[in-house]
Image (cartoon, rainbow, N blue to C red):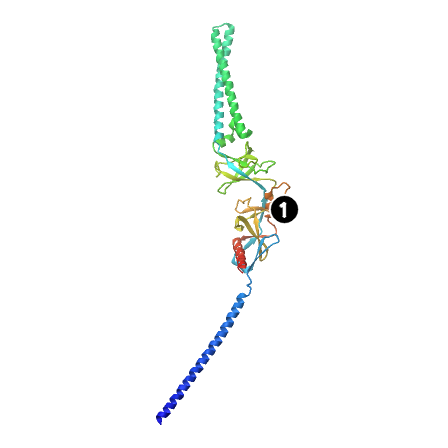
Amino acid sequence: MVMTDDKGLARHVRRFLRGLIVLVLIGALGVLLIWGFIEGRSEATAEAQREQPVKAAVHVTHTDTGLPTITLSSDLQKQADIAVRRPNTVPYQRQVQGYGSVLDLQSFTNLSNKIATAKGQLAVAQAKLNASQAAFERARVLHGKGEAISTAQFQTAEATYRSDEASAQAAQVQTQNASASAYQAWGPLLGRSLADGTALARDLIQRRKVLVQVTLPVGVSLAQPPQTAFIETTTGQRVRIEFVSLATRTDPKIQGVSFFYTADAASEALPGMNVIALLPVGQPTPGVAIPGTAVVWFQGSAWVYLQTKADTFTRREIPTGLPSPNGGYVVPVLPTMLRLEPDAPASDADSAAQGFPTNESLVVTGAQALLSQEFSAQIQVGGD
């Protein structure tokens, strides 16, 4: 009887355990179903949020003239350390660009030696002539008075005089020809300096100065070459040059009007060097000084950013033909450059499009950061 009760109890315990296990499994399955439902909803919500367009902090647009404009929040401006100010007003001098070469003056020195030799020979010949002429005059007087001088002695004195006279004349011609060669090779001013041995020729021969031939592009001319101009050497140094005269020959590679200028030999302008010449023309006009920190380079051109609104910056190309002594560049203001002279070269028309407006502030710090933000925003838009 006891065994029968134990077996019944065992069966009840097993049923209870099976029921409990089933309940636990059903509960676990319910939990899994609820968790999966919640996770699915969260993932769907996240996916929907990802598919929504993201409002970018930086916007890039273009003006009616095609200039890129970047809109940047004030917070991003602070992070990029953007600083703006009105640029300083300075005179702008329009320039014509020419091509220069620093000349080797060996032929110049050879002509100087030739002239000096001819002058020395002329001086010797003239001294002999003076002596023989005086001897001939004495012999002629004595022979005329019938004093102690024979006809043969008189004739010898006369022959010596006539010979020295011819030699002096030949020496004079050689001196004149040497001077004429100098005039023909180097023009009246340099030729006269060679012939007379003035300070200009001495400075060139003794290499206190160098001679620069400046040639304008074909089709470009100047009513009056400037008395002072500048050249830029291959190292970027700007050297002042002084006008001498019109050149007696053109550069065969350029075929334009040429001028002779001198430069200080202590500069980096060395014989045989090709340089860029910058010749000022016309009267100075209003301009602005662009500091070097404001300039960014893109595709070989110089650009600056102008603040057109509190959060808007427009990138504008600037001309680089007139570097500033303190770094950066001097550029024309926009209204002046739009009023071009009728005979202004095409390069000035290009500069007009790059003129600087005077009513907008210039980004003097953080320009490179703006350029990076501009192109980063364009890449993001392109990727979307």
In the picture, the quarter occupied by the C terminus is bottom right
Residue ranking furthest to the bottom:
1
Spot occupied by residue 217 in the image (x, y as percentages of width and height): 56, 38
Residue ranking furthest to the top:
146
Above or below, 339 against 214 in this view is below
- Number of labels in the image equals 1
Q: Is residue 187 visible?
A: yes
- Using the image as rendered, state which of residue 64 and residue 3 is in the foreground: 3
Spot occupied by residue 164 in the image (x, y as percentages of width and height): 49, 16
- Using the image as rendered, state which of residue 213 and residue 144 is in the foreground: 213
Q: Is residue 135 visible?
A: no
Q: Which residue is at a point 61% across and 46% down the rendered structure image?
A: 352
Spot occupied by residue 216 in the image (x, y as percentages of width and height): 56, 37
Give the structural element (helix, strand or loop) at label 1. helix
Spot occupied by residue 61 in the image (x, y as percentages of width and height): 58, 56
Q: Indicate the quadrant where residue 20 lies.
A: bottom left
- Residue at mark 1: 338
Q: Which residue is at a point 35% across and 92% down the rendered structure image?
A: 3
Left or right: residue 6 compared with residue 127: left
Question: Label 1 is placed on what type of residue?
Answer: Leu
Above or below, 283 against 156 in this view is below
In the picture, the quarter occupied by the N terminus is bottom left
Dot 1: within a 10 Å radius of its alpha carbon, few (fewer than 14), some, or many (20 or more) residues?
A: some
